[in-house]
Amino acid sequence: MNVDNTPTCPVIANHIKIALVGQPNVGKSMLINSVSNSHLHVGNFSGVTVDKTEVLFDYKNHHFTVVDLPGTYAFTDYTIEERVTHDYLCAEAYDLIINVVDSTSLEKNLQLTAELMSMSKSIVIALNMDDEAQKENIFINASYMSELMGIPCVKVSAATKSGIETLLDAVISVKEEPEQETKLIFSEPVEEEIARITQYLTKHKYKAVNSYRNIAINLLKNNKKTYAKLHDDPIWTELQPILIEASKHVELHHDSDDIKEAFAEEYASFNRGIVAEVLKQDATVERKTLTEKIDSVLINPIVGIPIFLFFMWGLFQLTFEIGSIPMDWIDAFFGWFGETLGATISNDDVRSLIVDGLIAGVGAVVLFVPNIIILFIGIALLESTGYMSRVAFLLDGFFHKFGMHGQSFIPLVTGFGCSIPAYMSARILKNDRDRLLTLFIIGFMSCGARLPVYVLFIGAFFSPEMAGNVLFAVYIGGAMMGLIAAKILKMTAFKGADEPFVMEMPKYRLPSAKLIWHTVLTKTMMYLKKAGTFIAAATILIWFLSNYPQNLILEEEYATKIENAVGEENKSALSNKLAESNLEQSYLGTIGKFSEPIFEPLGFDWKMSVALQTGLAAKEVVVATLGVLYALGDEVDEENNSLIKAISKNISFASAISFIVVIMIYLPCLAASVVFTREAGGIKYFFYLFAFTSLTAYFMAYIAYNIAKLFS
């Protein structure tokens, strides 16, 4: 295929802009990736978090821009993806539509095609997966189909790259034609009403961008935007009675009082007619397909869930075991880089800003990249093979009891490792309400960053024999509270009738390595670009609050004491005491003292309040903060015996239980909160999450504190 990869200007005479449209699982992304040497531009559609992929390439002296629109079954607004596709097709500027159709499921896919034909837009149909259709003895007469529909229909295979040039030739041909007349014919009563409305619009010379036929169809389908445009026009007074009679006529013909249902039947009848004419399938002995054989095991009511749990366990292990190897390298690199660069900076304040603030912030972002890469490879494999819809089928029943869907399980179980990839993986939930509900619950799944805090407090108050059981109870308790919280949210903030949960069971397919690489690369780069800058800036802010204002008199006083001290142990103790005093007098310490009365009912002192607030940056910081506050230095970990003794000596058992409960529930780390805000769709959701988690954590910790006091 002769495709030039020289970068070009997208706005020239021979430029062709294409909207790539199709139902989910028809291979749209794989099709555009099969165009060799194409240039991928990835971003977001305006105002939403839905990925926008544009492909630029040259072919036969034409410059192509292909916009890959989110998959949609029909022109509805059930999901944000469907709204994006519908709004783009209706409002944006493009030359024509390539409608990608699954050749092995022609009648179902033509549902969207029929609706596209009513738009008066130029269309080319790509009959994708032709290789799979042939294996199933399905043969489509593409030339006759083109003649019947008035639209070029081209057999292609994204997997084998066959038919790509023919498809592009058809696109060029349609672009050069003055107008395309599609042959979407409805039943006689509908056509009569379309003719009446069209005649009326013609008589009054109504000015419109779309054809009168397209306007008439939209009016009959009760399209709100079309009604809104005509409502303020003087012709509306006469047109409204015509539309009322037209609707009654169509509904009477279909024996239905739902005009949408009537048009669904119209499209289905048209599709059946096309399929009957152009599709031939050799008669074979009826036997189970490979997909049916695999499904008999994977969605078996007895062994299906255990198999899935094993798959998720494997993905979980790969994400956070293999991911920990490069994480250690990345952590060591940034530690070495900070020490090396810090040694060249003489000014203490500048060195602390660069090393403890900027480098630490960037390192915190990059540290999560291995987890994200491994996780999204796993999710992309599950999606591209067709297994993800089986996941929803298997788990929907259980999660439905808590107001959630089966697909919520993926981001929730991912949350036990890290909330950041968990929030990002919530994109698999297509419905806005389901996705938001899941995003609010992910924080209840204790991420790996909270583990050091749990180990520290459990080690201080429980015997080694009981520690493992207590830790298990903490994790399970958090998950159960999350499900209960989901039920409460479903009954309050997200209340309403359950949306229908309809799943497609696509055929199992081998994953495309190029498509998976593209998916993982783009998502990872978007994470680094969008989240990284905010996280680094916020980490510097935490550094500033914990280091200023500086008390020079106190510094000089302790410098003299340290100089006169005998023995390294005494000098270290004085240094730690200085660090504690500095932190107490810092802005962060002041905030801790100010907020101490708020947390007093939970059994917290100001030091525990400060630790919670530094934990907003990263939960691991809680341990280091407690080390500084208890005059042990910040180079301590959850297994530091001196810190464990200090915790058990200075904090009561009831306060420790209360503290653990707050750590379990309250706002995720700064990095995760930034990603949550982005995925939820706006800063207002961050404040909702802050209020929800804070109030829940406070309420549950208060109960836990008072119950624990009874046993202590």
Image (tube, rainbow, N blue to C red):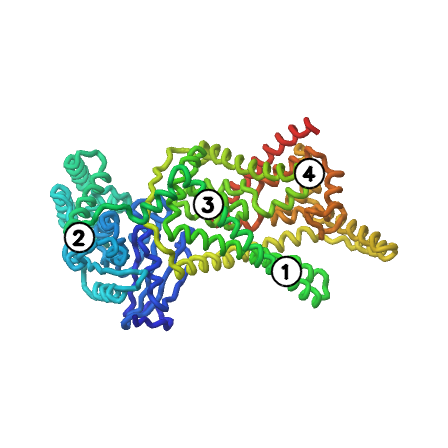
Question: Which amino acid lies under the numbered mark 1 shown in the image of this protein?
Answer: Ala
Residue on which the image places disc 4: 596
Question: Which residue is rendered at x = 35% and y = 53% of the image?
Answer: 509
- Contact between marks 3 and 1 (CB within 8 A): the answer is no
Q: In the picture, residue 247 is in which quadrant? A: top left
Residue on which the image places disc 2: 280
- Of labels 2 and 1, earlier in sequence is 2
Image quadrant where one finds the C terminus: top right
Q: In the picture, residue 15 is in which quadrant? A: bottom left
Q: Nearer the viewer, mark 2 or mark 3?
A: 2
Question: Which residue is rendered at x = 24% and y = 41% of the image?
Answer: 222
Residue 626 in sight here: yes
Residue closer to the observer: 482 or 694: 482
Disc 4 versus disc 2: distance between alpha carbons?
77 Å
Disc 3 versus disc 4: distance between alpha carbons?
38 Å
Question: Which amino acid lies under the numbered mark 2 shown in the image of this protein?
Answer: Lys
Answer left or right for 206 relative to 361.
left
Would you call the spot at circle 4 few (<14 residues within 10 Å), some (14-19), or many (20 or more)?
A: some
- Contact between marks 3 and 4 (CB within 8 A): the answer is no
- Contact between marks 1 and 4 (CB within 8 A): the answer is no
Image quadrant where one finds the N terminus: bottom left
Q: Position of residue 233 (x, y in %)?
A: 23, 45
Q: Nearer the viewer, mark 3 or mark 4?
A: 3
Residue on which the image places disc 3: 410
Task: Give the secondary structure at mark 1.
Answer: helix
Would you call the spot at circle 2 few (<14 residues within 10 Å), some (14-19), or many (20 or more)?
A: few
- Of labels 1 and 4, earlier in sequence is 1
Task: Give the secondary structure at mark 3.
Answer: helix
Q: Nearer the viewer, mark 4 or mark 2?
A: 2
- Contact between marks 4 and 2 (CB within 8 A): the answer is no
Disc 2 versus disc 3: distance between alpha carbons?
40 Å
Residue 322, placed above or below residue 593: below
